[in-house]
Image (cartoon, helix red, strand yellow):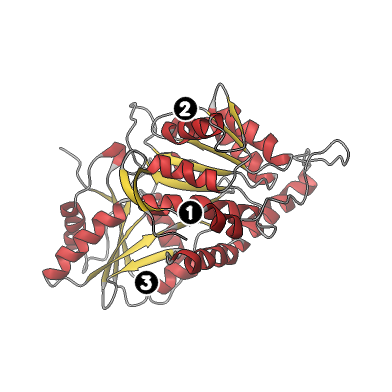
Amino acid sequence: MTDKRVGMEVSIAAAEAVKLARAEAISAYPITPQTHIVEHLSELVANGELDAEFVPVESEHSAMSVCAGTSAVGARTYTSTSAQGLALMSEILYIVSGMRLPVVMSVANRAMSAPLSIWNDHSDIMTCRDCGWVQVFTENGQEVYDHTICAFRIAEDPRVLTPMIVNLDGFTLSHVVEPIVEVSQEMVDQFLPPYQPVYRLHPDQPVTMGAFGMPEVYSEVRKAQDIVLRNSYPVILEVWKEWGKRTGRHYRPIETYRMDGAKLALLTMGSFGEVAMEAVDRMRKKGISVGLLKLRLWRPFPFEDIREAMKGVEMLVVMDRAISTGGIGGPVASEIKSALYGQTKRPKVISFIAGLGGRDVPPEHFEEMVDQALKLKGKKKVEEFYTIGIRG
């Protein structure tokens, strides 16, 4: 590694990471706020700095379709999208994961329309949480840079061969200039070997991919896919451990902040983790025993890590940036409740919805969540979810 620290827009950092990974095929369609990623990649290819095929297409559906083809013939493949673009891709997302094609994609998370919004929340990725891709959430620009490189190593591992999504909050991260510690091409080449597909489409060695599945085989295929995704967990840890040894930056499926002696904990996902850290510091100074859990690995879901992190916690405040409309409230909170169900000792989980459509969530709002949760401590019945920052 190098100690070179540079100020860089996070979207550009993501593109530079793709360059270091020596992606061979890129196909994308511009949509705010992910456009700067693929714009920069197109410049790198046009300038000869990245030896890759860049395929501009007429839609995100076409972009993922091209990615399916390039990955199927054995090319290291990348794309990026947001919001409605991700929704338009969704048909092909299931095909790519079902065919075990290790495509890597950045999703600059953005609110879904209507009403039209270009601002950040997690409603786009929650529409695709069960699409069969490995998924991680990043907190800052350095994490976007690191996890983009790691994603290729994870997805292409013969024990995984599953596509991977790196989530970054749109605008909150994508358009912000942050200090990035760069790594060398030499180090990445040592960390990330050339992709060697197990099977690929080739006229000299014909194979069938994505064939018609009769009812007699479909269930078994889906079960096998679920097993593969769950079994990617130790490989993810292995890759992150090696990355940590090389860079000094270590990652875990769920990360903790000031959890020593905490009876109440906040749980966040994405860039608001750093805001929550500020709120935790404030509350600790006031004598409130509160800590923070930051969920990084979304799929495969880290059940045991969640349970281990909850030991000693009596109340858990989960902040979701998406709402399961007409359902139980926050999708992350519902996953957490599911993970804790059946445990003999489990914390009371309080679900909060905040930050929809780019609404600001300052440290004061996290303090308000904790204050509300403490008032609910002795009550047997609580609402399915609460909202923060809603007028009226």
Quadrant of residue 110 in the image? top left
Going 51% across and 27% down the picture, which residue do you hit?
29
Q: Which of 342 and 277 is in front in this view?
A: 277
Above or below 137: residue 128: above
Q: Alpha carbon of mark 1 to alpha carbon of mark 3: how far?
A: 26 Å
Q: Check if mark 1's residue and mark 3's residue have beta carbons within 8 Å.
A: no
Going 53% across and 55% down the picture, which residue do you hit?
150
Can you identify the residue that label 3 sits on?
310
**Mark 1 burial class by Cα count in 10 Å: few <14, some 14-19, many 20+:** many
Asked which secondary structure carries label 1, the reply is helix
Q: Taking 367 as reference, is 58 left or right?
A: right
Q: Alpha carbon of mark 1 to alpha carbon of mark 2: how far?
A: 22 Å
Q: Alpha carbon of mark 2 to alpha carbon of mark 3: how far?
A: 41 Å
Residue lying farthest to the top in this orientation = 58
Residue 341 shows up from this direction:
no
Q: Nearer the viewer, residue 32 or 359?
A: 32
Indicate which disc, 1 or 3, sits on the residue closer to the N terminus: 1
At label 3, the amino acid type is: Met
> Residue 171's x, y, as percent?
33, 38
**Mark 3 burial class by Cα count in 10 Å: few <14, some 14-19, many 20+:** many
> Residue 80's x, y, as percent?
50, 37
At label 2, the amino acid type is: Pro
Can you identify the residue that label 1 sits on?
147
Q: Which of 131 and 278 is in front in this view?
A: 278
> Residue 71's x, y, as percent?
68, 41
